[in-house]
Amino acid sequence: KLGCTPEAPDAAGHLMIGKHGQYALLVVVGLPAPEPGYMYQLWAIRDGQHASGGMFTVTSYGYGSMTISIPQSLVGYSQFDVTIEPASGSPSPTGAKVLETRI
């Protein structure tokens, strides 16, 4: 489960990781629509290193979802965050953190 931060106090999310960690589904609710030119970016964090899980946006009601497929297993990651980033994506988090979790 991903919990809210002060930047998005009404937001919540769930990250469901498949058996081998190669595929996952992220579902979020209560996120405000980002400003034009920005999207949300999921980060998988291990040993202080951030790996992008991809970019997504939300509906006008704050709902969003994203399927994640990565070459490395998500199982070994200890934390997942969602930040607001430029629509082109960022190599590491630069924007406000809106969701976070520690597994």
Image: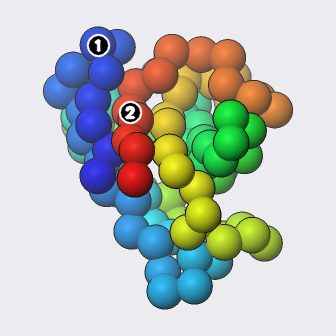
Q: Residue at x 29, y 52 (%)?
A: 1
Q: Earlier in the sequence, mark 1 or mark 2?
A: 1
* Residue 88 visible: no
Q: Which mark is residue 99?
A: 2
Q: Residue at x 73, y 38 (%)?
A: 49
- Crowd around label 1: few <14 · some 14–19 · many ≥20 (10 Å): few
Name the quadrant containing residue 52.
top right
Find the residue positioned furthest to the front.
47
Q: Is residue 34 above or below residue 25?
A: above
Q: Is residue 14 above or below residue 69?
A: above
Q: Residue at x 57, y 85 (%)?
A: 20
16 or 76: nearer the viewer: 76
Q: Residue at x 52, y 50 (%)?
A: 78
Looking at the image, residue 11 sits to the left or right of residue 18; the answer is: left
Looking at the image, residue 31 sits to the left or right of residue 70; the answer is: left
The residue carrying mark 1 is 6
- Asked whether the residues under the numbered discs 1 and 2 touch, taking CB atoms below 8 Å apart as contact, a structural biologist would say no
Name the amino acid type tagged 2.
Leu
Q: Is residue 80 above or below residue 10?
A: below
Q: Position of residue 88 (x, y in %)?
A: 77, 32
